[in-house]
Image: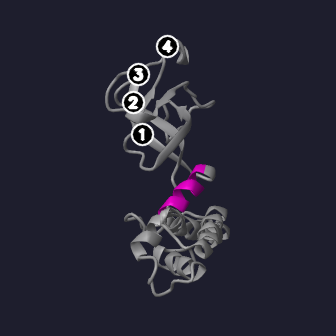
Amino acid sequence: MPATLTALRDRVELMIADVSNVTFSTAAIDEGIRQALHRYSKRRPLSVITTLNIATTGREVSVSSLTGLLGVSEVWLPYTAASPEQPPLRRAFELWFDQQILYFPYGSNGGHEPTAGEVARIFYSKLQTLNGLDSETVTTIPLDDETLLAWGGAGYTVLPRAREATETVMLTEQAPISAQLMAWAKQK
């Protein structure tokens, strides 16, 4: 059964030996899991194919509706789902990530400019999701990678405490504990 935030949080609490949340709040653990999930997604994003209706004619097409977008690998335009073009009409594009825009340059695509009413088929990568985290209702992480995510969540949960302990004035015999905590968190 796919992991949920609650189940993953319980695993992290066991890994950091804090099942009663005496040292780490559930909010801190959830943030650790969020950071681990984001880093995991950069290495192993979720591959998605969708269609996008072109609303207005022009070389700039908004992709703001693609939540969790990490990158776009291919665009077929125009695309007809009932009778797909053979071969597909692959178009050159630039992803202007900060503006959430696909730009179709003048000098490529045989001069094709996206037209209102056309449909684009978009192949893209996005962040993985965990049921219960940030209002998600589905877990997309492969079952085999859940332990990896739990260890990453444990590391990211402990890291701020290790930094805090390093910056705190400590007795000489406590300094190695801080160093060990920092090393453990980075390793995870």
Asked whether residue 74 is in view, the answer is yes
Residue 6's disc is none
Contact flag, marks 2 and 3 (Cβ < 8 Å): yes
Q: Nearer the viewer, mark 1 or mark 3?
A: 3
The residue beneath circle 4 is: 111
Magenta-colored span: 34-42
Dot in front, 1 or 2: 2
Kind of residue sitting beneath label 2: Val
Looking at the image, residue 95 lies above or below residue 166: above
Q: Earlier in the sequence, mark 1 or mark 2?
A: 1
Image quadrant containing the C terminus: bottom right
Frontmost of labels 3 and 4 is 3
The residue that disc 2 covers is 61
Question: Which label belongs to residue 59?
Answer: 3
What's under tag 1, amino acid-wise?
Answer: Leu
In the depicted structure, whether residue 186 falls above or below residue 104: below
Please state the horizontal and vertical placement of residue 11, each as a whole percent of the image. Answer: 56, 79
Going from the N terminus, do you reach mark 1 or mark 3 first?
Answer: 1
Closer to the chain start, of discs 2 and 4, is: 2
Q: Any mark on residue 52, and which?
A: 1
Mark 1 → mark 3, Cα distance in angstroms: 14 Å
Q: CA distance from mark 4 to mark 1?
A: 20 Å
